[in-house]
Structure formats: C-alpha cells, structure tokens
Image (cartoon, rainbow, N blue to C red):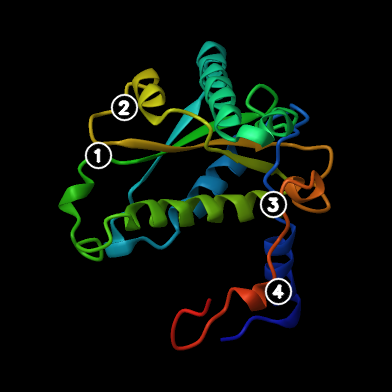
Amino acid sequence: MRYSDEDRDTVYRVIAERRDMRHFSGGRVDEGTLKKLLAAAHLAPSVGFMQPWRFIRIRKTELRENIYQLIQDERIKTAQALNEREDEFMRLKVEGVRDCAELLVVCLMDGREKHIFGRRTLPEMDLASASCAIQNLWLAARAEGLGMGWVSLFDPNSLQDLLNMPEGSRAIAVLCLGPVEEFYPRPMLETERWAERQNIDELIMQDGWRD
C-alpha cells in the first residue's frame, strides 16, 4: 500500500537532508536511540541474506585517540598522493572523532567466503550489503536529529590489529555519531568547492553505455 503524501515527503526529505557531518557538539546519544539506530542498520538488505555487518562501539578514550591518530596518519598520506591539491585537502576538516558523542567501527565479518549466493562472480557484494546498513543508520540518525560522518581515512590492517579483529574480517568505516549544532545546508565538500554534485541526467543511460 502506498504511503500517505506526508509520509512520502518525509522519506524524500530525510534523504535530501542527510549530510556527511564533520562538526559535532559533544553531548550524548541515549542508549534507547542508539539501539534503534543499530536496529535500523540491521534491517538493511544483504545479498544472500548474509548480513555481513559487524559494529564495534568504541567506549575507551585511549582507544578513540588511537583511532584518531590512525586517521591523521592516513590523512597526511592521502594529501601527499593528491599532489597539487595537497594543501587544499589539508585545510579540510575530514573527521569528528574527538568531538562526536559515539564512535562506531563497521566491519565485514570473517568467514564471508562461505557465502556464495549472489557473490560467486561479485564477491564485493558483501561490502555493498554493509554499505546499505550504514545508509540505513545514516538516514535514521538524520530523522532523529543526529549527525553522522563516515570516515574512510585509515589503514584497515592497522585498525584491525588495534581492535583485535579476527583474521578474514575487515574494517570498512569509522562512523562519528552525535548531536550537532546545525546540519550543513549543502554537502560540505560542495560548499568548500572540492567537488560539485553531477547532473543526474548525465548519469542515466539506456540500452548500453554512452560516452
């Protein structure tokens, strides 16, 4: 059954107003809300119903700081790889690890090779499935008035060692979550003129690839 006009508008609104947040105002996320957000993530679709996502909640201050340092190490290496945009990149705020109320690490489980359904020719569908879970969490957080930022600037092996993850698992995201003073009116990287949103009409093709 189709949702009401108001409900449909709300769905499209939360999608449009979702932002990759880097600025947080401290505070806290109450346990009930956090549980709802993670339950929303767990409702995501997954190829072969494998549910490859695992969530590690970071509670120790020392561990959060260690993760912060891993991100800073990769930030410098990324800047150097950008060549002429190095200085521009270093001026960007790329994470809110020290300021956010909650820090979550999203991982792919170990033993994923046993799941063949939907992955025989596309093994990366485990990552696609976990990304759907992250998007669910992101949209639910926005609906709750909470900001979330996805940080991918880290060496996965170093983070896996830091968190004592089993062999075969893989860290794919550090999520900063918590209250914010305001949501960016536009994506931050667009406001900072790092990149622009592409025209959707230029990304849609019919009956084959178009140059």
Label at residue 69: none
Of tags 1 and 3, the one toward the viewer is 1
Q: CA distance from mark 1 to mark 3?
A: 30 Å
Name which of mark 4 and mark 3 comes first in the sequence.
4
Label at residue 110: 1
Name which of mark 1 and mark 3 comes first in the sequence.
1
Q: CA distance from mark 2 to mark 4?
A: 41 Å
Location of residue 68 (image quadrant): top right
Residue 128 at x, y percent in the picture? 40, 56
- Image quarter where the N terminus lies is bottom right
Q: Secondary structure at mark 4?
A: helix
Q: Residues within 10 Å of mark 4 (few under 14, many from 20)?
A: few
Q: Residues within 10 Å of mark 3 (few under 14, many from 20)?
A: some
Residue 155 at x, y percent in the picture? 43, 28
Which amino acid type is marked by label 3? Arg
Which amino acid type is marked by label 4? Asp
In the image, residue 151 sits, relative to residue 185, either above or below, namely: above
Q: Secondary structure at mark 1?
A: loop
The answer to whether mark 4 and mark 3 are in CB contact below 8 A is no
Residue 33 at x, y percent in the picture? 62, 43
Name which of mark 4 and mark 1 comes first in the sequence.
4
Residue farthest along the left direction in this orientation = 114
The answer to whether mark 1 and mark 2 are in CB contact below 8 A is yes
Q: Secondary structure at mark 2?
A: loop
Name which of mark 3 and mark 2 comes first in the sequence.
3
**Residue under numbered circle 2:** 165
**Residue under numbered circle 3:** 142
In the image, residue 103 sits, relative to residue 200, either above or below, namely: above
**Residue under numbered circle 4:** 7
Please say whether residue 30 is visible from this viewpoint. Answer: no
Name which of mark 2 and mark 4 comes first in the sequence.
4
Q: CA distance from mark 1 to mark 2?
A: 9 Å
